[in-house]
Amino acid sequence: MTRRIIVVGAGIVGTAVAERLGARGDCSVTVVEQSSRGRLTGSTGHAPGFIGLLADQPAMIELARRSVDCYRRLQWQGLPGFEPVGALELAHTSQAADQLTARVAAAATAGISATLLDPAEAVAMAPRLADPHRVLAALHLPEDGAARAAVVTCALQARAAAAGVRFLFGTQVTGIEVRTGRVASIRAGSGDLPADDVVLACGIWGGDIAAHAGVHLPLFPILHPYAYSAPRAVAYPPTPLVRWPEARVYARDHGDRDGFGTSDHRPVLVAAPSDRAELDWPGGHLDDAVDAALALLPPPHRWQTGRRQAGLLSITPDKLPLLGPISGIGGMWSAEAIWVTHAAGAADALMKMMYDEGPAIAVLDPNRFSGESPGELRRRAAARYRDAGDDREHAT
């Protein structure tokens, strides 16, 4: 009997999982997505797409590498899936400069290219973003870049569909049936879909969907602001991604405008809205955070923000993904809290786990918080949000 697999969520993670499974040709794959076709209302739809290879966990480095390998080969409507623009990390204090030196050593250990630059070299690479009067040191990571999340998702969706994967758009999951310890079906729309496996890849809604099976996933939607400049008339050469780790800020050249994100604000955990991974801009302390981020730019290049976006992403108590089998329910799998940086690599790793062709990744085990208080896990997730080093990996 053909193995029946249902993937919940058609953002970049769910679509990547479906494409990997569909390419096998030995299973039946259905993707259930609450949004209509062509709309990316989850975190994928507003992801700035920062790709940073260097991370504290070797497993995350490997997932990022595999993702970049995938994105480099993709295009959609003439647009590439990945832009290899590199990245700069800027230090404004001697302590931050010392941390950049330590990251060079860590990069060498991981086999990632990294070079320390003097202030003049950094300003020459990113003159609109690096303030020559404040930069003390810089780190250049030439293998980093920017993914076009929508391009990657559309390209993978087309490949999955060509392989026979079925997509059910505009369909909500309202139940998961478990029989004798195994997943049996899901209720989607007005009917039931039999399933041998269910993969949760639905971002900020993952916790709500898991609850239908009596599972508590320590997955918390959290607000993350991103702001854009107004469109510019003058075309500039491509600029590397720029990060200010000590300020918890990162910036990207989007071509026709610049944008930046910041986690230098009070964490705001929320209930997931029903229809999109975004809130109306609340102002207040988020306005203060955006203003502080703008102050990092050279005075001649500080701009008035155009759109301010209160996006939502999923966060866990250790800020790492939940990837692998969910214990206690056979055939139930998690691919949650995964950013664009790691999406394709995580999809490949999960597919291999499902077919016993690759090992589980212990540090990403979805069950690693089992038995801990939900309230304590929520507190730890909020506390991890502002960890400065993790802003290097934001790709929501």
Image (spheres, rainbow, N blue to C red):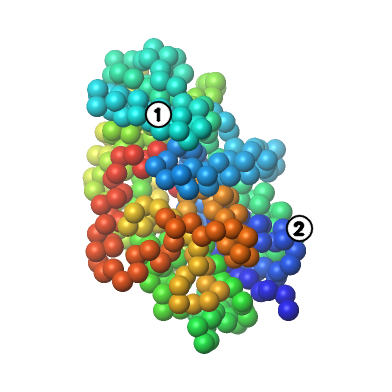
* Looking at the image, residue 175 lies above or below residue 89: below
Q: Quadrant of the N terminus?
A: bottom right
State the SS at label 1.
Answer: helix
Residue 54 image offset from top left, x and y in percent: 45, 37
At horizontal 54% and vertical 21% (from top left) the residue drawn is 237
Count all numbered tags in the image, as a single digit. Answer: 2
Q: Earlier in the sequence, mark 2 or mark 1?
A: 1
Q: Which mark is residue 162?
A: 2
Q: Is residue 320 visible?
A: yes
How busy is the neighbourhood of tag 1: few (under 14 within 10 Å), some, or many (20 plus)? some
Q: Which mark is residue 260?
A: none
How busy is the neighbourhood of tag 2: few (under 14 within 10 Å), some, or many (20 plus)? few
Residue 233 vs residue 297: left or right? right
Pick the residue in front: 114 or 314.
114
Residue 196 image offset from top left, x and y in percent: 61, 77
Pick the residue in front: 117 or 76.
117
Residue marked by disc 1: 105
- Marks 2/1: CA–CA distance: 44 Å
Asked if the residue under mark 1 is in contact with the one under mark 2, i.e. CB atoms within 8 Å, the reply is no
Amino acid at circle 1:
Ala
Q: Is residue 222 visible?
A: no
* Looking at the image, residue 103 lies above or below residue 335: above
Residue 264 image offset from top left, x and y in percent: 27, 41
Amino acid at circle 2:
Ala
Residue 28 image offset from top left, x and y in percent: 70, 70
* Looking at the image, residue 298 lies above or below residue 166: above
